Image (cartoon, coloured by chain):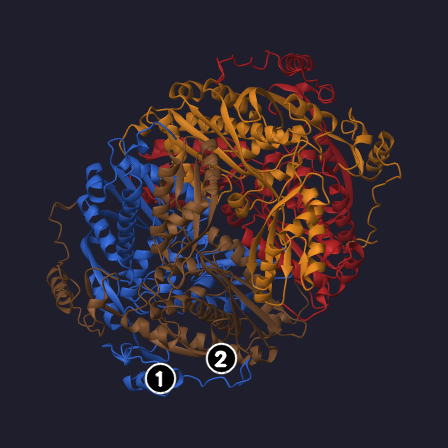
Chain colours: A red, B orange, C blue, D brown
Amino acid sequence: MTHYCGCMVGPSVPRAADDYTRDQAVRRRDFVREQVGADLTHVGSYSLDPATLPGNVENFIGVAQVPIGLAGPLVIDGEEAKGDFYVPLATTEGTLVASYNRGMGLLARSGGVRTTVISESMQRAPVFLFDDAREAREFGDWLRDHFAAIKETAEATTSIGRLVEIQQFPVGPNLYTRFCYTTGDAAGQNMTGKATYAACEWIVAAHGSAHYILSGSMDTDKKHSHVNQLLGRGRRVVAEATIPAAVMREAVGVDPATMFRARQIQTVGGYLAGTAYLGAHAANGLTALFIATGQDVANVAEAHTGITYSQLLDNGDFYWSITLPALIVGTYGGGTGLATQRECLELLGCYGTGGARRFAEICAATVLAGDVSLAGAVLAGDWVSSHDRLGRNRP
Amino acid sequence: MTHYCGCMVGPSVPRAADDYTRDQAVRRRDFVREQVGADLTHVGSYSLDPATLPGNVENFIGVAQVPIGLAGPLVIDGEEAKGDFYVPLATTEGTLVASYNRGMGLLARSGGVRTTVISESMQRAPVFLFDDAREAREFGDWLRDHFAAIKETAEATTSIGRLVEIQQFPVGPNLYTRFCYTTGDAAGQNMTGKATYAACEWIVAAHGSAHYILSGSMDTDKKHSHVNQLLGRGRRVVAEATIPAAVMREAVGVDPATMFRARQIQTVGGYLAGTAYLGAHAANGLTALFIATGQDVANVAEAHTGITYSQLLDNGDFYWSITLPALIVGTYGGGTGLATQRECLELLGCYGTGGARRFAEICAATVLAGDVSLAGAVLAGDWVSSHDRLGRNRP
Amino acid sequence: MTHYCGCMVGPSVPRAADDYTRDQAVRRRDFVREQVGADLTHVGSYSLDPATLPGNVENFIGVAQVPIGLAGPLVIDGEEAKGDFYVPLATTEGTLVASYNRGMGLLARSGGVRTTVISESMQRAPVFLFDDAREAREFGDWLRDHFAAIKETAEATTSIGRLVEIQQFPVGPNLYTRFCYTTGDAAGQNMTGKATYAACEWIVAAHGSAHYILSGSMDTDKKHSHVNQLLGRGRRVVAEATIPAAVMREAVGVDPATMFRARQIQTVGGYLAGTAYLGAHAANGLTALFIATGQDVANVAEAHTGITYSQLLDNGDFYWSITLPALIVGTYGGGTGLATQRECLELLGCYGTGGARRFAEICAATVLAGDVSLAGAVLAGDWVSSHDRLGRNRP
Amino acid sequence: MTHYCGCMVGPSVPRAADDYTRDQAVRRRDFVREQVGADLTHVGSYSLDPATLPGNVENFIGVAQVPIGLAGPLVIDGEEAKGDFYVPLATTEGTLVASYNRGMGLLARSGGVRTTVISESMQRAPVFLFDDAREAREFGDWLRDHFAAIKETAEATTSIGRLVEIQQFPVGPNLYTRFCYTTGDAAGQNMTGKATYAACEWIVAAHGSAHYILSGSMDTDKKHSHVNQLLGRGRRVVAEATIPAAVMREAVGVDPATMFRARQIQTVGGYLAGTAYLGAHAANGLTALFIATGQDVANVAEAHTGITYSQLLDNGDFYWSITLPALIVGTYGGGTGLATQRECLELLGCYGTGGARRFAEICAATVLAGDVSLAGAVLAGDWVSSHDRLGRNRP
């Protein structure tokens, strides 16, 4: 194989039949050294057992060592998560852990965070193709009429996944759909992919004239989307707290009225910007938690979307809620069973069956802690310091 | 401090004056064991030197070991990235490395990927507050008139950052802005935050009646936004390739005409969904690269946005481009100097000064490889197998 | 009442007990002459009977004479609209009628337009307010459990409206909803407002602790919205046609392959712009039809949204579809019974009961005609004239 | 020409060399009667002179008589609009005039509306096509380097239009642009189309290897778009007022604190819905004004977008602003010179040269009046009546 430049393209990465061993990792690191001259000593320093990696990575050469900082206690009054949690955050961004830690302290002094999982749903989104809109519409009716059989077919592929609904979005001669499932403690992308594929093959056979693509792009896998905000993906979770005025002043140095006014102005800015998240920085905490606990970190693209709704109460306290409509997490499968990842999930009491909902609550509470802290920092540093700014009766 | 439940809130995470040592990490892991009963043996297994961590993490307890797989060679015909690259991808999602690797093979056989950095810009986005819209408009004029002085003030805080432009978005009595900088080989969020703060303080003093919040939310830091898509954040990068029909058929088992039609249908689906990315899964490759190389991984929330533009050429070959308007990366500062992260950047020849642009090109080329591969997999598995689907002359 | 300038604010517009007469209109025009010195002779020239205007306008002074041009025949193969239609377009924009007329000719020569009403739904969108997210979630369950009673209450206020579904969108402590109705041949905003108000009052009484605002802004009345695109408002209608290559070349001077490539490029441009409509100019035809036929013209803000999906067929012909997800029209009530408006509806065979679906089909077919024509004009005038542009094998 | 049904397609609408006469309108109405059996007596009743219609309509058959109601006085403290205005609103939606009238009364008692035109810009948006992204980027540089010559070429086609800026949005191998003009008192779509076409032809000739489509869809003509919200189209106008608490209570029966809380909740609802307008119903007032004054009414699709920013002041008064970023209006050309339309513009003191800015201010002030009134009605009717709802200290 020759290059655009006329020279030869380099060799492929070496593999072996028994590919998940320390030796194979060494061989590949040696290969890198030969090809590129790069040293991977630290990458080669790890305690996990390569034999645990099939299903998680291919062409394994070692690990990224991502530093973990510990924040907490995060006090949660959830339905599954109840009590104090120490939260492992894997990050290389300085002050992130300190800032979340500060926010957790503030929330603890406010009586903790109330968390609620509103709903859950994971999707695959096949599009069905027809000759014209009328055929597509008739197929839509057919789909509704055959839901029971489709559900049975889909669920035959999985012991956990349950097909709950098929949403329809007709455009021209095509019917875009979202097949919505519950997936237990797994994030569920693979499970629902397999189930939907089986369902689609059944549909095509049973219907006789339907064609399809397994994804018409309305699952928006690993991509933010407005449909996720509206209709949810993964879990829709709310975290909320009421922060006494005195606590806010002491902990972040900002008056609730100032914070509230800033929230209004930033909400308008976020709307104008067309932003995916109306709060400060959900992505920071979620990413750090996801890396630490073996989540599919690319889901942050979807999971970071959300809405802040806050209220200045009559007594001067500050009610603060964040709603995450597309929080995609799992405590079973994926990377959750790997060495450090499992330890971090166990640290949160969330590893394995029954943990996903609790973990979702912890994620949302963590996001709230980070937003309160950063919002305070933005204001305390530069706005409030200018003493008179809010003292005038002005818009 | 008492709980919502009436019991006492748990103790804070222990710290020490000399906090970045192995011993301190041990103390904190012991603390976790006492508080929660969790074992963190693997988390405590690492080769990095804790003394390197100030500025990257607080309350350090150990590391997440994220498996790295090697993909490549990725053949790039860029302006900074030229030749074969072996790409370290840190992930726990099975098949990800294999899929990107397959895409890289396909692109190598197609003559490689052409990459182009179109522009670069990092923002901070203060909002300035006035009594009415006319004052805000006049301040906007004032801002344009005093750009030279503002630029000088901002740039005095940094040896690298350059203030290029101040974009204005007036709403009611407030003027939302985006201060746009070039930031060399750093991602630049901190640099531009510091510079903009200095600029704002100068503005407030010089102007006399302006008030501000350092972020009016139009920087959309760690959040996808439409303003990023339009006006860019970080680097705006294009990766493009022309895939011979025969190569596409052999490598992913799909005919270019089939692929093209699927792209059209998925583009419409993506538009309808209100998705942030018109291709398959930029977030997957970017996340894996970001973890491996010490990027601020939360930037994936912004960086994953983009547009696919493809074309079925008259000769049957397939032109494929992806445009990433908000690719935020750095090869200097942040997590780039840590043990494994630096090794991975060196493996790509991108560590340190002068590497950011090259690294951005590698990121974009990687995204293209992954999109080609996954798009093929989606089609080969379910669509094309149904032989007659494209044989009819139909919409 | 005094002015900001210190002078007196002018008098109110005169009214009378019997206010809908020619004399009262004269009095008000005299008032205008006295106050402002403006002559309204033409405004005062009209044939409609003011006694027909209660429920349509207040403080009547006369009419806007909006010129109507006639386009057609528009050949439709719909479910309700079948055959040739001559379409009255009220506009002051030169070339609009001519351009739509040209498009209708092209479509007639292509065998006409196939139209399909996919679904219909008109909404009111109360938001229900609670103390926390858990209460809101429980209320959501309560709402589902009491749907039959709510439906009965809502439908008791109307002989036509039917409550089909209540969609739920929880955010923080609040539950945003969309109450979805069918509304027969009326557009239905008033009908559904009244029904939803009755339903909400019943809900508040029956539930005991719910509070609400009648609109939480998710009905997006008179405003474009993404939720409309996804879930529909008014009628979701598709118009589609297959244009023979020869017809396209002769009628608009453009080759289908050129047209198709332009569509792709413009689709990407529309996505990047964040546009509400992926075609050329639905708003033009809809506005002209709406003015002529007594629709609530402000609904154009919602109705103009839509998606173009086109396909270059193997035989070189061009399949073109437009999908309008939020086409809000009525043929009963509102302005449909006024003098000229009724005549124009009758010209289309759509006045009164049973006409709304037919009229929706005519609207969609008109939009398609205008889009085909304008798209051709944009290309024929400037693109194709440059002979060699598509002759090269390039992206 | 034969139908899809096999029968003959109906005849074309008759035209004549001298087509703009009452006789020709009669002939066409007779044609309609023959073809469809429809009577158009009222349509044929008009006072305008058909000889004035070339450039406004083709195939003229008569007029739509749209009732006009008079609202006011609207008290404006603008830069061009100063004093009391009586506003002609052409509508068939009952209560619209009464509601705007009520809002104007409330605002008059509040000292009037302050209006500010922030900026103006009309666009055409050609896309330039290249072989790869690097060529497109280089062309972007070329475009900046040749701006003076392009500006000269564009402006040679118009005595009024001025090319101010060319915005660039590169995607893949294509460069999307927005050519931004000021257009005096005309809305300017035709003027800028002609100028941009001339500019593009010059560019193609001078550059040598650029190809283009005159619209790459980023002008979003007659379509709402996010780019309009961010960067503006037509005029960006703010209307603002401070409403004393007592006035709000008396005039719409709502307490400012209640109104403010509702605004917050509705802002979140609007964000979630992905709405184009964060207020109540800009489209209603704009449409009625546009029909009355001969604006291109389809521009409502763009013009209705906007942002409400409000503030509950320390003294309990309510600051309310609306920002319309894409208000496209003209007082010269288009339909502004027709019989009733000109009278209505003269009634507002806006006809002809020098009137556009004043008219834009009146439009924005009218929108504010309507929003205040409707927001009050929504609350007074259903929310506040439930006495205790706001009496509790709750989120």
In the image: residue D256, left or right of residue D372:
right
The answer to whether residue C145 is visible is no
Residue C385 vs residue C326, the one in the foreground: C385
Give coordinates of residue D224: x percent, y percent. Answer: 43, 54
In the image: residue D395, left or right of residue C354:
right
- The image shows residue B114, relative to residue A175, as above or below, that is above
Residue B361 vs residue B379, the one in the foreground: B361
Give coordinates of residue B128: x percent, y percent. Answer: 64, 59
How many other residues sit within 10 Å of disc 1, few (<14), some (14-19) or many (≥20)? Answer: some
Give coordinates of residue D250: x percent, y percent. Answer: 55, 81
Residue at figure coordinates x 41%, y 83% from the top left = C13
Give coordinates of residue A213: x percent, y percent. Answer: 40, 33
Q: What type is the residue that disc 1 sits on? A: Arg
Q: What type is the residue that disc 2 sits on? A: Gly
Q: Chain of mark 2?
A: D
Residue at figure coordinates x 19%, y 60% from the top left = D59
- Distance of label 2 from label 1 (alpha carbons): 21 Å
Query: Label 1, on which residue?
Result: C33
Residue A357 vs residue D210, the one in the foreground: D210
In the image: residue D228, left or right of residue D289:
right
Q: Quadrant of the C terminus of chain B?
A: top left
Q: Chain of mark 1?
A: C
Residue B331: mark: none
Helix, strand or loop at mark 2: helix
Residue at figure coordinates x 21%, y 59% from the top left = D58
Query: Label 2, on which residue?
Result: D105
Quarter-wise, where is residue D362 in the image?
bottom left
How many other residues sit within 10 Å of disc 2, few (<14), some (14-19) or many (≥20)? Answer: many
